Image: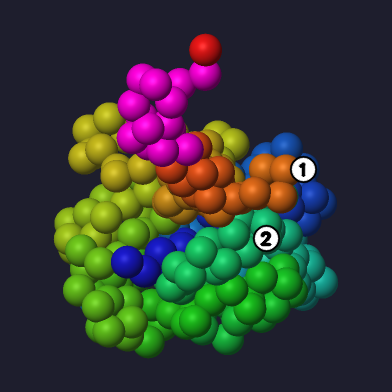
Amino acid sequence: MVVVFDLNGTLLDNRAVQPAIRSIFGRKLGSEEFFTRVLQYSMAFTLSGEYRAFGEIALAVLEMEAAARNLTLNEADKKLVRETLKTLPPFREVPKSLHRLQKAEFRMAVLTNSALEDAREQLANARIDRYFEQVLSVSEIQRFKPSREAYQFAANALGVQPPDILMVAAHAWDLMGAAAAGCRTAFVGRPGKALLSAASRPSHAVKDLTELANELIPVKAPRVPHLLTTIGGVGVISALAVAVTARRTRSDRGPSALPR
């Protein structure tokens, strides 16, 4: 099995872009609404048979939302949002959980809607890039998640079949696409995220990656003391052998040999 992670909002905390959005829009637009709009239009491009890079769509949405509110968006504003998106921090438990999974010899990869170079930069800035054997971007097929093609692309790139993939995401829509492609799924309940009851139940539903690692990593059986552990300098087996031999010897001597 290969554990494949979504990037933005699953490994990296999107909430970190909130100060940048607030500095432009005040309380007229929040980071969650902004990302929802970006995802909405990325899916619209895929459904209409077109493609634009995820970062390009994000800036276009930023401009659209500013124009809708009669706000002036300057280059400094765009740069601030762009740089913030590239430096999103990992959720607190992510590095340790990835380390545990790597130590347990799980294959791990990332499948993201971000452009490939952007994704690599995000992972490097978050200092978690070393845990993944591959970083896979939909930019290579120009079809955004949750299209089935994105997950089949990941399976092909990793040399496995879709059922050999466990797709991990904090977004119900991402897991819907993965399940439709035949992948196993794991939902991570990040703040403000919940499962969609109308969708199929994921293989795992956890609060964070610590809990997911606990479910995926087999529990080792308790260590049984070795039979040759010595007690008072005499091995357990040797001590038992001496006792059995002595008992047999007394028995062979018959009743007359027993002490009176």
How far is disc 2 from disc 1 in space, using C-alphas? 33 Å
Quick one: label 2, few (<14), some, or many (20+) residues within 10 Å? some
Q: Which residue is mark 2?
A: 95
Q: Amino acid at mark 1?
A: Gly
Q: Is residue 255 above or below residue 145?
A: above
Residue in front for this viewpoint, 118 or 107: 107
Q: Is residue 159 above or below residue 9?
A: below
Q: Position of residue 5 (x, y in %)?
A: 46, 63
Decide whether the magenta segment is chiefly helix, strand or loop: helix
Label 2 element class: helix
Question: What's the residue at 53%, 50% (across, down)?
Answer: 238
Residue 165 visible here: yes
Q: Amino acid at mark 2?
A: Pro
Task: Name the image quarter holding residue 48.
Answer: bottom left
Q: Which residue is mark 1?
A: 26
Q: Is residue 17 left or right of residue 76?
A: left
Q: Which residues are magenta?
A: 246-259
Q: Number of callouts in the render?
A: 2
Magenta stretch encompasses residue 258 = yes
Quick one: label 1, few (<14), some, or many (20+) residues within 10 Å? few
